[in-house]
Amino acid sequence: MANFIRITAGAVTATAQLNDSHTAQAIWEALPLEATANTWGDEIYFGIPVHLGEENGQEVVELGDLGYWPPGNAFCIFFGPTPMSRGDEIRPASAVNVFGKIEGDPKVFKAVPSGTRVVIERAEGG
């Protein structure tokens, strides 16, 4: 059975489904989490107390993907191009472990400025 999380960033709330990766399980076990959002193009990221290596690292991700960035121990929400993107692709700074996907429209995160408080908690199934 899939695990679901609720991400609240200021006035924006979204639900995401986690995949069955080791990364997703480690993040699930660390919940709830609270952090301050940083923005990088159409990406929000923040450090979390989970320390993992690369697991099926992806250099390009899809709209709405959740990624874990090993070099910064960071939780990443991708909702559009980043400064590293070429064309319409969504490219992290370097490979990330994709561990879940936002349900619904991930572009709601465009309304979240850097410095916003982000809370991630377990949620009931989508």
Image (cartoon, rainbow, N blue to C red):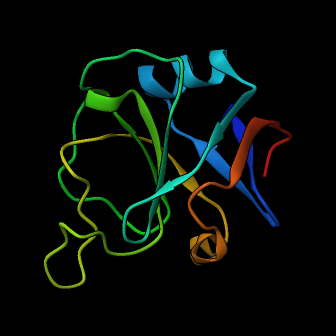
Quadrant of the image occupied by residue 29: top right
The residue lying at 30 percent from left, 69 percent from top is 82
Q: Residue furthest right?
A: 124
Residue 60, percent from left and from top:
22, 59
Quadrant of the image occupied by residue 96: top left
User: Image quadrant for the N terminus?
Assistant: top right
Residue 26, percent from left and from top:
53, 17
**Is 39 positioned to the left or the right of 85 in the image?**
right
Q: Residue furthest left?
A: 86
Q: How many marks?
A: 0
| Front-most of residues 28 and 115 | 115
| Front-most of residues 12 and 27 | 12
The residue lying at 67 percent from left, 71 percent from top is 104
Q: Is residue 87 above or below residue 32?
A: below
Quadrant of the image occupied by residue 56: top left
**Is 21 positioned to the left or the right of 36 in the image?**
left
The residue lying at 78 percent from left, 52 percent from top is 126
**Is 24 positioned to the left or the right of 12 in the image?**
left
Residue 119, percent from left and from top:
75, 41
| Front-most of residues 113 and 89 | 113
Residue 97, percent from left and from top:
33, 36
Q: Residue furthest front?
A: 115
The residue lying at 56 percent from left, 60 percent from top is 114
| Front-most of residues 107 and 98 | 107
Q: Residue furthest bottom?
A: 87
Q: Is residue 99 above or below residue 83?
A: above
